[in-house]
Image (cartoon, coloured by chain):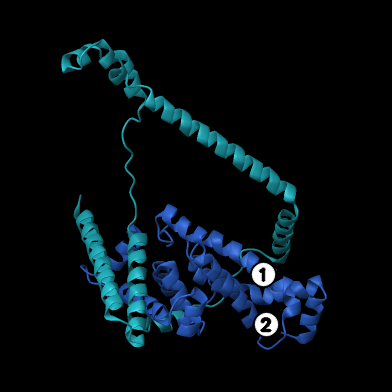
Amino acid sequence: MAPDLLDQARRGDEGARARIYAALAPATYGLIRRLIGRRDVAEDLFQDTMMIFYERLDAFRGEAPLGAWLRRIAVSRCLMYLRSPWHRMRLGLDGTGGENSPDEPGPARSGVPGGCPGEHLDLERALASLSPTARAVVWLYEVEGYSHQEIADAFGRTVSFSKSQLARAHRRLRAWFEPRSESVSHAPRSSATSS
Amino acid sequence: MHPDPARRLRELPSEIPPPYDWEEFQRRARLRAQRKKSPTLWRYAAAACVAVLALAIGAVWSRLSDRADPPAVAVTAPVHSASTPTTVVAGFDQSAAQQWLARLPPEPTVVRFGTHLVVTDLEDRIAWVDDLLTRERLEGTTGTQVALLQRERARLIDSLARLRYVETVSNQLP
């Protein structure tokens, strides 16, 4: 991100802010969709994140890339949501455990550019079959590069909590992608969709 | 494709087109800012909540008092005479009883509840107890606490096993 563009955005220049939005919004929304399965909630959190980002732009000291700073804000917002009692109550009312229903399009269906759409779709479904906590932990650890200690701090739990969530998520993902024989194939899927 | 799930996750595209453009983002931001700045709206909302709550309490209260009324059987029967079963039957006001029965809900509603959340919660608790056990063992505290935690863990595992059994049985039902 060019420093003069950042300066203009800090001064409130709409054009500069729009250009920053165009550059950073796709990655930010992508991250939020991976951490939060529900599209409506993800949109709310995306709006929150971007608003906080622009409000705090003056506080950005340039010690890390702007995108990384924005990702931190997004992760923080998502974890706040996952920890909130409202979210837990909502899961209880839904009875879905926070998983995407088979009818609800996952992120891949909403137009993921590039790659192999079929494989990505399957992976998105596997990811959606995890519990919200396990999904967040596996994504933060494997993709965002968080350490177990950082994840534990973020969730207000212990390191072994993070490790056990990660191990459970791996088990489930492996079970999802195991070569399917008639007897084994539907076990993880049916358990994911029936609950 | 690579069998390692972690590697597969990293291969997923990191960008997804945002749900709306810059103009729409600004419009929504303005809306939220207005909502924050308008305390009158909150006052109206709070008043509406209070009104709805009062109505709900009134409705529940009236329903409960209706249910407390009806036993014409219980009230009229002892008046007639000594409490023998025959006199109770004689004093039984059939039409009142039928009206009372008609006011009852037709049949209990069956609600299907997914077990996924309960399973996740149990697994979380087990993980939490495991954390505590590890910490207790590392700190070398008294055996009593460890024994307590182990007992709690056994109880949770037992609950999980029962739940899994119920799931299996219910899956086999037609």
In the rendered structure, the colour chosen for chain B is cyan
Q: Quadrant of residue A69?
A: bottom right
- Please name the residue that numbered disc 2 is placed on: A66
- The amino acid pointed to by label 1 is Met
Q: Quadrant of residue A164?
A: bottom left
Residue in front for this viewpoint, B126 or A194: B126
Task: Examine the rendering and report whether any part of residue A117 can be seen.
Answer: no
- The amino acid pointed to by label 2 is Leu
Which element is circle 1 on? helix
Q: Say whether residue A94 is left or right of residue B49.
A: left
**Where residue B124 appears, x then y in whole percent?**
37, 69
Work out whether disc 2 and disc 1 sit on a shared chain. Answer: yes
Q: Say whether residue B43 is left or right of residue A189.
A: right
Query: Disc 2 or 1, which lies upstream in sequence?
Result: 1
In the image, what residue occupies the spot 37% across and 61% down? B117
**Where residue B40 appears, x then y in whole percent?**
74, 47
**Chain label for disc 1:** A
**Where residue B69 appears, x then y in whole percent?**
38, 22
**Chain label for disc 2:** A
Mark number for residue A50? 1
Residue in front for this viewpoint, A12 or B155: B155
Q: Say whether residue A195 is left or right of residue B158.
A: right
Relative vertical location of residue A11 with respect to residue A101 in this rendering, above or below? below
Quadrant containing the N terminus of chain A is bottom right
In the image, what residue occupies the spot 50% across and 79% down? A153
Task: Examine the rendering and report whether any part of residue B36 can be seen.
Answer: yes
Quadrant containing the C terminus of chain A is bottom left
Residue in front for this viewpoint, B69 or A138: B69
In the rendered structure, the colour chosen for chain A is blue
